[in-house]
Amino acid sequence: MSENAEVSAIFCYRLISPGGQCTEWTQTGVLYLSSAEGKYRMGGWEKVMGKTLLEAEYVEFDRFLIEFSITVMKDPLVTCSDLLSPQVKLPPPELSNDFADLLESKEGADVTFCVQGETFPAHRVVLAARSPVFRVQLCGPMMEKDGSYVIVEDMLPGVFRALIHFVYTDCLVLPFDGFDDEDRKEIVRHLLQAADRYAIEKLKLICEATLCSCLDVQTVATTYALADQHQCNDLKQACLKLMASPTILGELMASQDYENLKRKSSSTALEILESVCKFPKI
């Protein structure tokens, strides 16, 4: 071994009898050897063979024959750190973009939706995979006679476009060009209704979270009625929390939206809020 060299090796041995019969190879674990002074490490075996058997089978003329094999271990071409930190740069996920391109190209579309005269070609297998309502409507026994052409009632074209885009891409893109803040909130409300109608729960939660973040005294009554109708509990709680302020509730109770809400909703929470507002302050 060269001076100051360090290697790792595996040692094997077997006994050879005078008649040429060999035992099975016996192997050590990996031993680390160094030629540097003070760094020699020794390895060996204990209880190789009983003395009686050794003398009877392998000793002749007070000698016995042992064959050794030494395998020097080289450094691996790929280390663990290389595996944990690959040099190949992976591209970003492309599935969403691929499905968006599929929707945009209309290639292979086998169903067309008509919303207020505007048509939307789509692929029934994609819709069925993402919505149990679409699955029943397009693939189940209740499928309409002309299953390739579906008229959608009570929905805006822009809302349906955003709904279908989310079905394909799992991303929400709203038609905001030319809309002010109030128009955008109204679109989100309609989209929440559409998501609930087609049982697309993730989209429904996204709309719910969006409406929670933009509540105000002008829209809270309408939003509460929407949340109550579509079982959006988090949105209802956010509305109640805003309305719980005596100053806001007093102003709200004088509005027409609140009167409409009381007629449509039998919520006990509203009665409690009114009682708190009217209770004399101490």
Image (tube, rainbow, N blue to C red):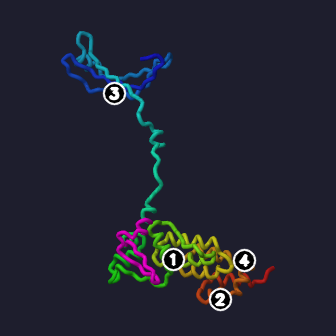
- Amino acid type at circle 2 is Glu
Is 227 one of the magenta-colored residues?
no
Q: Is 102 situated above or below 62?
A: below
Q: CA distance from mark 1 to mark 2?
A: 30 Å
Examine the image and state in which quarter residue 12 appears.
top left
- Amino acid type at circle 1 is Gly
Q: CA distance from mark 3 to mark 2?
A: 89 Å
Q: CA distance from mark 1 to mark 3?
A: 74 Å
Q: Which residue position holds label 4?
A: 245
Measuring from the top left, give residue 105's x and y in whole percent: 40, 68
Going from N to C along the chain, the mark reached first, 3 or 2, is: 3
Report whether 163 appears left or right of 28: right
Q: CA distance from mark 2 to mark 4?
A: 18 Å
The mark lying in front, picked from 4 and 3, is 4
- Within 10 Å of disc 4 (Cα), the crowding (few <14, some 14-19, many 20+) is few
Q: Quadrant of the N terminus?
A: top left
Extent of the magenta region:
100-123
Q: Which residue position holds label 3?
A: 27
The mark lying in front, picked from 3 and 2, is 2
Query: Residue at 43% across / 24% down in the picture?
Result: 7
Q: Which residue position holds label 2?
A: 259
The mark lying in front, picked from 2 and 4, is 2
Q: Nearer the viewer, residue 156 or 25?
A: 156
Going from N to C along the chain, the mark reached first, 4 or 1, is: 1
Query: Residue at 25% across / 24% down in the picture?
Result: 23
- Amino acid type at circle 4 is Ser
Q: Which residue position holds label 1?
A: 158
Secondary structure found at label 2: helix
Going from N to C along the chain, the mark reached first, 1 or 3, is: 3
Going from N to C along the chain, the mark reached first, 1 or 2, is: 1
